[in-house]
Image (cartoon, grey):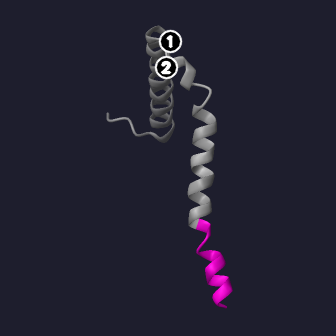
């Protein structure tokens, strides 16, 4: 039974490393774009616009608009 709990206790560490791996894989292609100021500004603008689009879309879909 102790082996079972030892095995279950490894899952949070696996979840954290798996999540960090996904973020690293998603962000690593964008890192070269931050070396020049022009592309850095454009990249940040696109990321902010994408986040705003998703946020506004979810607010509208879930009916969270303050009316």
Residue 13 magenta-highlighted:
no
- Distance in Å between CA atoms under marks 2 and 1: 6 Å
Residue drawn at 59 percent across, 50 percent down: 19
Residue 5 magenta-highlighted:
yes
Q: Quadrant of residue 65?
A: top left
Q: Earlier in the sequence, mark 2 or mark 1?
A: 2
Residue tagged by mark 1? 39
Magenta region: which residues? 1-11
Residue 19's place in the image compared with 40, above or below, is below
> Quadrant where the C terminus lies?
top left
Q: Secondary structure at mark 1?
A: helix
Q: Position of residue 11 (x, y in %)?
A: 62, 68
Q: Secondary structure at mark 2?
A: helix
Residue 37's place in the image compared with 22, above or below, is above
Q: Position of residue 53 (x, y in %)?
A: 49, 26
Which is more toward the observer, 49 or 24? 24
Q: Are marks 2 and 1 in contact (CB under 8 Å)?
A: yes
Residue drawn at 62 percent across, 46 percent down: 21
Q: Position of residue 49 (x, y in %)?
A: 47, 21
Identify the disc placed on residue 34: 2
> Quadrant where the N terminus lies?
bottom right
């Amino acid at each position: 039974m102790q082996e079972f709990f030892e095995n279950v206790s490894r899952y949070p560490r696996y979840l954290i490393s798996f999540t960090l791996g996904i973020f690293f894989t998603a962000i690593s292609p964008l890192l070269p774009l931050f070396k020049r100021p022009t592309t850095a500004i454009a990249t940040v603008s696109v990321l902010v616009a994408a986040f705003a689009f998703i946020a506004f879309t979810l607010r509208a879909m879930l009916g969270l608009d303050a009316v």
